[in-house]
Amino acid sequence: MKLIIAYIQPEKLNDVKQELFKNEIKKMSVTNSLGCGQQGGFHETYRGVDIEVNLLQKIRLEIAVNNDFVDQTVKAIIKGAKSGNIGDGKIFIVSLDNCIRIRTEEEGEEAIG
Amino acid sequence: MKLIIAYIQPEKLNDVKQELFKNEIKKMSVTNSLGCGQQGGFHETYRGVDIEVNLLQKIRLEIAVNNDFVDQTVKAIIKGAKSGNIGDGKIFIVSLDNCIRIRTEEEGEEAIG
Amino acid sequence: MKLIIAYIQPEKLNDVKQELFKNEIKKMSVTNSLGCGQQGGFHETYRGVDIEVNLLQKIRLEIAVNNDFVDQTVKAIIKGAKSGNIGDGKIFIVSLDNCIRIRTEEEGEEAIG
Amino acid sequence: MRRMIRWFPAALMIILNSSLLFADETAAAVSYKTPPIDFLWMVLAAFLVFFMQPGFALVETGFTRAKNAGNIIMKNLMDFSVGSIAFFVIGYGLMYGDSISAFIGGSNFFLSDAAPLLPKAVNGVVDNSGMLMYAQWIFQAVFAATAATIVSGGMAERTKFTTYLIFSFLITAFIYPISGHWIWQGDGWLTKLGFQDFAGSTVVHSVGGWAAMIGALFLGPRIGKYGPDGKPRAIPGHNIPLAALGVFILWFGWFGFNPGSTLTASGRDGFSMAFIAVNTSLAAAAGAVAAMITIWIRAGKPDVSMSLNGALAGLVGITAGCAFVSPQSSIIIGLISGVVVVLSVQFFDFVLKIDDPVGAVSVHGVCGALGTILVGIFADTNYGGGMNGLLNGGGFKLLGVQAIGILSVFVWTVATCGILFFILKKTIGLRVERNEELRGLDIEEHGMESYSGFQIFRNQ
Amino acid sequence: MRRMIRWFPAALMIILNSSLLFADETAAAVSYKTPPIDFLWMVLAAFLVFFMQPGFALVETGFTRAKNAGNIIMKNLMDFSVGSIAFFVIGYGLMYGDSISAFIGGSNFFLSDAAPLLPKAVNGVVDNSGMLMYAQWIFQAVFAATAATIVSGGMAERTKFTTYLIFSFLITAFIYPISGHWIWQGDGWLTKLGFQDFAGSTVVHSVGGWAAMIGALFLGPRIGKYGPDGKPRAIPGHNIPLAALGVFILWFGWFGFNPGSTLTASGRDGFSMAFIAVNTSLAAAAGAVAAMITIWIRAGKPDVSMSLNGALAGLVGITAGCAFVSPQSSIIIGLISGVVVVLSVQFFDFVLKIDDPVGAVSVHGVCGALGTILVGIFADTNYGGGMNGLLNGGGFKLLGVQAIGILSVFVWTVATCGILFFILKKTIGLRVERNEELRGLDIEEHGMESYSGFQIFRNQ
Amino acid sequence: MRRMIRWFPAALMIILNSSLLFADETAAAVSYKTPPIDFLWMVLAAFLVFFMQPGFALVETGFTRAKNAGNIIMKNLMDFSVGSIAFFVIGYGLMYGDSISAFIGGSNFFLSDAAPLLPKAVNGVVDNSGMLMYAQWIFQAVFAATAATIVSGGMAERTKFTTYLIFSFLITAFIYPISGHWIWQGDGWLTKLGFQDFAGSTVVHSVGGWAAMIGALFLGPRIGKYGPDGKPRAIPGHNIPLAALGVFILWFGWFGFNPGSTLTASGRDGFSMAFIAVNTSLAAAAGAVAAMITIWIRAGKPDVSMSLNGALAGLVGITAGCAFVSPQSSIIIGLISGVVVVLSVQFFDFVLKIDDPVGAVSVHGVCGALGTILVGIFADTNYGGGMNGLLNGGGFKLLGVQAIGILSVFVWTVATCGILFFILKKTIGLRVERNEELRGLDIEEHGMESYSGFQIFRNQ
Ligand SMILES: Nc1ncnc2c1ncn2[C@@H]1O[C@H](COP(=O)(O)OP(=O)(O)O)[C@@H](O)[C@H]1O
Ligand SMILES: Nc1ncnc2c1ncn2[C@@H]1O[C@H](COP(=O)(O)OP(=O)(O)O)[C@@H](O)[C@H]1O
Ligand SMILES: Nc1ncnc2c1ncn2[C@@H]1O[C@H](COP(=O)(O)OP(=O)(O)O)[C@@H](O)[C@H]1O
């Protein structure tokens, strides 16, 4: 089992969700995050003074999947999130030791979906 | 060492915390999260129009524990969070390579508690 | 590749960022978090009634780095975040299986930086 | 004189030769029983008092949790809406209709005594009382709504919406008007006794405050308010800036509430609007300062929400006597109210364990009674009122009458609200389910979020 | 009598012997064509109507998303700022200048007819009309700004800022004043027909509402408002407490809007400010209750934002007839408006699929027309207006005239705004880029965030 | 005639035959030295100016960070509360008491000259000046509070709470009243020179603004405001909608500030309230537009907070001359103020490096002085004031006098505040600890959070 962590542009969340749904991946958790990456940051001004905003709003997705789902999950995220511009985001993959569904106390691959 | 990530219902946080405390697990980090899971989402209406809310507010717990604490941590979470209804949440377990306490620069099992 | 998760005091974020930048670590993701740790919590009062605030505001950093960067990242975080007081925070290190840059679909060590 | 002036579409008149329109007065030298300036003052004061509605709404919203914000807003909107219709249909008649045994009014329902037409002049004077009654109604209606809206604060974050609607209707239609009749209708039994409550510390605020107290008592505390050890825990309000805006709006609106209660802008009684305004503002200022100092001493920090409550306490405290006391006395009354409100909030919280999220009982109930009794001490006939208080050589007489009035209203409100809440509890229920309370009334009762998109911790 | 009084620095006068200053009036027994109390009432009412500006700003801000909050604020600030200068330069002259063919005004630009000096008394009467015109202007200017600001709500969250500025200028300079001329200038063709719109259900609200409708139509719905299946999706507002405050402020300001439209505080017309205030408030209350019940039935929950819209609908609905109907009728008009606004919002959402984020079209356009037509049914000459409606034995005559007026204003607004938005769309463009809309207008158009530091979900 | 009217409990009078109560005036044909309408206008204007308090509170709250919101609210509440008591006890006497050497007042502390009783009529005229003084006091007190509250904005986010309390007391008790005496008391030396400041651009706003400047200078910039390279960094405000509401409330309140400064509603001076209102509103509108364009040019985007400042700048700028200039000139004054405020904010930010979080120094100090000097250019005796400015053929005379006044007030404020802040800094300290500033004043000074439950990034 893997835990897929993806940082994407906020406005892409709906597209990514749709791609994931098409691939029958319907479970995920979403958090707000501020990202600092190659995108560097852009310049806002407030009252005529520059703000070097180098913490940009990003959406952080966490999706736990069984191993045979990893590829299609990654592809779906890329499909939904990619615009070709700097700031599109990153995907990180971590191994999961276990997964437990609280309601039923099922464990492992059963519990993920 | 393991990192236990748990998604629970917001209103269960206090119960979960109490169960954890009973088990002498007193350290954790809490984040807000939106969850998309089997619970599917419920219908709100706003100005007479349905909202299919499929991102539900969840609490995300992150608890780093030594290996011999994993079981009781998981059990405590389940005890506090379980209502038997869809949406009760999930627990994910990831292996931790290391843990460092910033204040003392202690590392490893020492640093966790 | 490692994923470094650090909890620090909110007011230390700028210092930590500066230390990381000095070490050429320029990518990271930042989330708000509430922490429950040794710091215990402090007492506020609201309308004359005590609040035992045991969930303190913390900043959660997530930094994915290649293995040879782990040490200097950890040191930079410590340098920026350490005040010697309880509540300075923790650093957790998790192994990363993979990392993908959405924009270019690069994978692995290439994609991290 | 034309009995009825043809109405032109609004802004049109600008163009018409206005001398025609005013021909009535100027040319014919007709005068009116109530001069135009009294109409103007009465409606303007009513508008100011109306504006206290959002003041209450914001204070209550700001001092409670984000998950219930929409619900408390809705309660404030509806207690005014339902309440003002109820007051039109029933309440006003019970309060100001012809007195039945000095206890209750019995005429003028649906404003049946008002008249939009002017009668012929008699001896050069036109009796415009029929038209004045509309001004009186709007002025009284916003007072009635003030009493009603106080209750939502004390019962916040756990009361069923439908139950609250029913209660709002009943307090504005019956409970408030009847005790109001005793004090503010010329034939009421407390009026006759000489009870003095100029702008309603007792008539309005205490009634609202005691009703809130009974409501909070029947409801029980919010989940999490008291620990397993029985100690109170703070449940912090979610938006202090909004609450503060609410307090400032209330202070502003109070300039309609107190000075407006002269009901006239002409003659000596009209001129007194000026010193009443001074008294009102000084008492509020003193209340804020005193509450800040009191809580600073007791809790170690100058708590913002308590200081805001202190300003309100000063305002409530001076309401009864604002026309009867000197500015110096007003400052003292404000200071006393500011100290008392803090002690009272803590007394309800720690000792009585009645969970009143916004301090409505202490601010309106306790300080309302306090202000009324202090009239018996500080009243000074140089300012008004016709009876001196203890400190100005009036002895204990006025003090006694004030005590009787306070007590009667307390008993009346506690009894009627007690019965009412008892019945409501046994029938449709007072309180939402535990789960609804935990998830928040916004989602459960109204199917919405008040701060969509914002990340909010919603535990507890 | 001095023709010109020397001005002393403000607070100074306090110290001077004021009898000197008032010598003019008291001593010489001079009277003024328009009495001081009319000036006072007119400017105070204007201030109240001005205060509706933040009311609109808050409603529109609260009912839309956090990422566009600064932009909508800015639009509201600027439509008033640009608009009131435009109205000073052009608009007022077109509306109230000497009529050219009963269709348009043609004089008094830059308030050229106003005069800050008083002429000599003639027969003991000083004609102060030159000074009165300033009062009239400020009163009319805030009305014009009301019409303009309504539009920003319907076009929220996707309109280009510069385009909106141009539109604001044009509606306040030309579109609103011309149809206003027909109805509120004594020589306008609808005035002559006998069309009755006391405080502007049609003149102000419908114009704003229909303009918003055309704007929303030309813009198209916000991204995500309609699913691929064509079904509407809710895009919840981000700050319901602020929106509610906005509604209460509007309600408060409406006491300037309607009662203030008497334009006089003296004589019978002045006294009617009282019952107009009663009518206004009762209709708002009834509108809120009716909307709450309607949406409760239709959606299963008492929706807060709809109930707030209901109060506004009641206010808009009573605006035309507030001086011509009884309080009982006002309640009925409010109830009807409250039901209709809900049905209308849903009709635009589900059937016409015109995306109106705050319900501006239904509240102002539809309920404005509705209120105007209801005058033809409920008008009662006992209250004012000179013509009875259907229910008071006036037959269909007034109803017919009202229908003509409503239709003319509809056609005028739709036609002029249609052409205007068409040209704007083809030239500088109406709508921001898709990406700008997704990221939010605050960052894209103004380079800022409205809630810096707050964590907000910004998807959609 | 009864010298003292017996006071009836408030709403009671409704029931009594009101002809009895008005018998005084109507029957006996008694007249009053100051007519009732002047009382009414003066207290209403005072209420409006009071309402500027939450306006300031919201602007300052909105333009600063969430972690300090409760603190800034508290400062605003307390500067009014402490200040109005100080002004009652000391300030008013120093400002309007009998003049000692044209420099300072020396009587009427505790309003000892006011009287709630009416004397016997002399020649049919009752001298009601004793009662009028209450109206004058409340009107002047809210002006004093305005000056005081301006300071909290410039010193926001880093000032110790107790230090601020002491300062508030001292500015309202001494600093403001003394320079105010020079200009607004009939015997003050600047009055005698012919200095013209109708509603207080200099008396009120500049005093507040310069005090804020000195405060900000002594405090030093907030942590993080200037980078290691010395370049300013933006510290965005956390709640733009609230700040915007504040600006609208201020604009609304300014209708009491400027038109209310006629101090009379009767006679020619009373009628001028109308054109003063026009001037006030047009200048604000022009200020907003000009600031928007200026910042648009300089920073590439129409910044919302600057445009809001622009409206305030226009209001401050027109305050001195609102009764002396034409509407056209008002627009020009507004435009100039709007441009200047932007340049000034940037000058303080980039060049002087005085960290003024809300722009208080530029809006109130700079534009206050600017507006005062512009009177010397645009003043037109057709409108009022008795002296023409440069453009109306008055030559440089008035301009010179205005310059002297501005300079004197600048020197006075800078000197007294300089000494004061120096002493405060050396004794109890001006500024909170670094750590307190980082964690926020809400938690550190008041032990609370302003937005409990909301997730907020609190770094910096
Ligand atoms: N090494 C990293 N560690 C943690 N988060 C990262 C890392 N690299 C990127 N991110 C996250 O991904 C987001 C997008 O990264 P960015 O470098 O801007 O995109 P791109 O790779 O397309 O240029 C960042 O804002 C940040 O939130
Ligand atoms: N595979 C997953 N990946 C990430 N988060 C998940 C996953 N499955 C569940 N979650 C999280 O757990 C929450 C509860 O899951 P849900 O499926 O609704 O509960 P249950 O398993 O009791 O039906 C979800 O809202 C989501 O936040
Ligand atoms: N075992 C843990 N699991 C998850 N988070 C932890 C753990 N220990 C500490 N933290 C996080 O780190 C923060 C600081 O920890 P704390 O124990 O207060 O610091 P210190 O170790 O310096 O005493 C906590 O508030 C919490 O967010």
Image (cartoon, coloured by chain):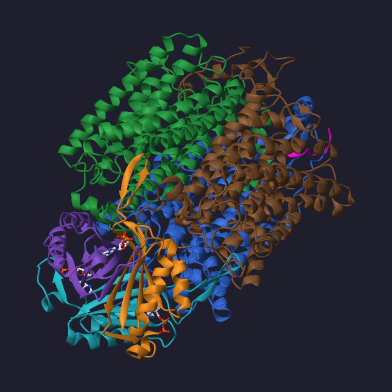
Chain colours: A cyan, B purple, C orange, D green, E blue, F brown
A11 horizontally vs F243: left or right: left
C40 horizontally vs E423: left or right: left
| Residue F41: quarter of image | top right
Residue E232 at x, y percent in the picture: 33, 70
Query: Magenta span has E281?
Result: no
> Looking at the image, is A65 positioned above or below residue C85?
below
Task: Pick whichever, C4 or E384, lies toward us.
Answer: C4
Q: Residue at x 36, y 59 (%)?
A: C57
A5 horizontally vs F46: left or right: left
Q: Residue at x 75, y 49 (%)?
A: E114
> Looking at the image, is E97 positioned above or below residue E432?
above
Task: Pick whichever, F386 or E456, lies toward us.
Answer: E456
Query: Magenta span has E8?
Result: yes
> Looking at the image, is F236 positioned above or below residue D179?
below
| Residue F136: quarter of image | top right
Magenta stretch?
E1-10
D37 horizontally vs E232: left or right: right
Residue C45 at x, y percent in the picture: 36, 43
Residue F233 at x, y percent in the picture: 57, 66
Q: Residue at x 53, y 55 (%)?
A: F243
Residue E353 visible in the displayed image: no
Image quadrant containing the N terminus of chain D: top right
Q: Residue at x 79, y 51 (%)?
A: F373
Residue E433 at x, y percent in the picture: 48, 79
Task: Pick whichever, E182 or B72, lies toward us.
Answer: B72
Quarter, ligand 2: bottom left
